[in-house]
Amino acid sequence: MPSSHLRRMRPLLALGALLIVGWLAYWPGRTGPFLFDDFSNLAPLGDYGQIDTWWKAVAFLTSGFAGPTGRPLALATFLLDARNWPAAPEAFKLTNVAIHLLNGALLAGLCAALARALGLARRPAAWAGVLAAGLWLLDPFWVSTTLYVVQRMAMLAATFVFAGLWGYAHGRALLAQGRRRSAYAWMSVSLALGTLLAVLSKENGALLPLLAWVLEALVFDRQHTAVAQGGRAFLAWRWVFVRLPALVVLGYLATFLPGLWTGAMAGRDFTPLQRLLTECRIVWTYLGDIWLARTHDGGLFHDDIVLSTGLLQPLSTLFAVFGILALIVFAAMSRWARHPVVAAAGVAVGFYLAGQVMESTWLQLELAFEHRNYLPAGLMFLPLAIALVNGLNGVRPGLVAQASGLDQTPPRRRWAVWFAVALLALLALQTARRADVWGKPFQQALVWAREHPDSPRAQGYLANFWSNTGNTPEAARLLDAALRQHPRSLILLINRAGVACALGEAPAGLRARLLHAARTADLADNVTQYQFGKLLDGLGTCSALGADFGQDLIAAALANPHADQTAVQRDLLHRKALAALSAGHAQAAYALDLQALRLPDLPVGARLRFAVELASAGHQQEALDLLNAVPSPLAHLHGWSMPALHQRWLRHVGFYQDSEAHLRKVLMREIAEKSTQGTAQ
């Protein structure tokens, strides 16, 4: 191979080496388990048996509930790993790692294109792109995104955003060269298709036009050359493909702004204003974790964050708010920066803040998750990469465009090479160490509990591990200590009740505190709802809290004003129905089931399940009456949301209709047989 060709290939070879290092760094995490939202999002893989026909695949793809779109494209990729449930997690995690590596490669191309637009020559820009992408790829902060299977949704959204922006940057370069037809094709397809595919993976993919606007303002049109390059036609195109879609997204977010004044909490423990103020502090924590390869492992539990209830409460809120405002001003002012490193820093800041506008402002989501930074931080290391490449070449800022490459590096400039290698090695080692923790669930629980001593969820999670290993006294000690800090935490009380059942004795006051919490806590919270259901499931064989405690707990929960969510009410009423059925009170069970089924948003299979339970207990007539009393939710469908599309598809394939017809036939035959037996007697 000619030496000149080899030199041109070096950035690509370096990128390949970084991808291999990334794969090896994440390898220890492949043995980790599924976690939390993995179960609810992946369980539909088994709703209709093994997915071995096309209608089952479509049913799964339309079953998503994680966002307004249902995220069908992300669900489609799960079929690469398994087509039934339960399944082994290793294949899912390795696919996530592969997607992360793909994102690193796409980011290398995007960063190289941006470096070119900021004035670097082709080969230095290629090296800057590879280094920026490598630093992002190996940052240990992404372990909790990459090895948490369900966050593939966030990763895929980033995939299509990075690809769309890279295509847009390529089209922008073609426009500067006067190749307008090719430029418009590249830019239009990249933005339109990239946004569509990103949104079908996760809703924050809709930020692609806004991020393109940031790049347009701070990179491509920073010297006001748009008219000279593309004429008035380009300005019109930019409005249609960049600004109007971005304004639509911002307008949608603005519809939630009144909550800042009304204080509508939407089932959270904080108002939108409190969330906005708190997010200003959280963003600075994110930035520290991205830039500093800390030894802590972050994790998924962030219910120990202190709320900002005002600018001075706590005082750090004021500094955080002013810091965010300063970053916004810096990003805006960087448009006039002459040095490419300063300009790249402004781009990285503007890109990051724009990428956080959906999940880290006033929408009533949970306060903090590390995966929210995966896309916004894509350009975070571009300024450092350009600085190191400049240092390697020894080029003055005004001569960057004339830089020839990296091959004639003076010895005194080699510090930049060794600094880059050392930094990449440090990040890779920290990523491998953190991935190793994610591959060992018990160690993971120990680390999370140690790093979040004020988190009820983290302490309860570790207590479950101690219980599962048979060390219930240690679980009790851990929970009792946590309850002294958080005496009203329903999560901790639920876990303590489970330990009490295992030990056969409950501490004084636990029963009363559980009943009080069931009457007052937010049962609509997904984590609380899941834990509460697990507790109720286990109380049937528990003597430590009394024989009827399960029914007392259900009654207390039904009296809870926060239990008005239909899914919560339906579950509680159905549990009462099952208790009545086991006690031989068929009519009471029928009445409770009927009440539960008449609540809005009825799941398609609930009628059949409730009827089968009645029939299995020997009450076929009540089961048939229940089917007749409540029409199938498939009978009258409205709207074209993803849940509605899912139900329309199930109606089209006749899955539940065939099941109901078969059930009715069996019930009528058994009722007739009972009648014949009764007459004969």
Image (tube, rainbow, N blue to C red):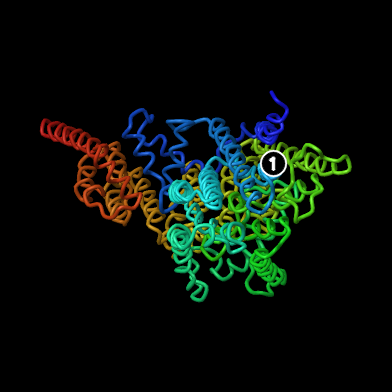
Q: Position of residue 226 (x, y in %)?
A: 54, 61
Taking the spot 45% from the left edge, 55% from the top edge, the residue there is 552
Q: Nearer the viewer, residue 449 or 148?
A: 148
Q: Locate residue 487: give its quadrant.
A: bottom right
| Amino acid type, mark 1 | Arg
Q: Which residue is mark 1?
A: 123
Q: Is residue 596 above or below residue 20?
A: below
Between 544 and 681, the one lying in front of the other is 544
Q: Please determine whether, in this image, residue 592 is positioned above or below residue 100.
A: below
- Left or right of 611? Residue 480 is right
Single out the residue that lies furthest toward the right: 412
Secondary-structure class at tag 1: helix
Q: Taking 276 as reference, is 3 left or right?
A: right
**Which quarter of the image is occupied by the N terminus?**
top right
Q: How packed is label 1: few (under 14 Cα within 10 Å), some, or many (20 or more)? A: many
Instruction: Let me know if residue 115 appears in the view.
Output: yes
- Expressed as whole percent of the image width and height from the top left, the position of residue 296 reads 73, 47
**Closest to the observer, 605 or 474:** 605
Task: For the C terminus, give its image quadrant.
Answer: top left
Above or below, 156 against 1 in this view is below
Image quarter of residue 465: top right
Q: Residue at x 44, y 40 (%)?
A: 75
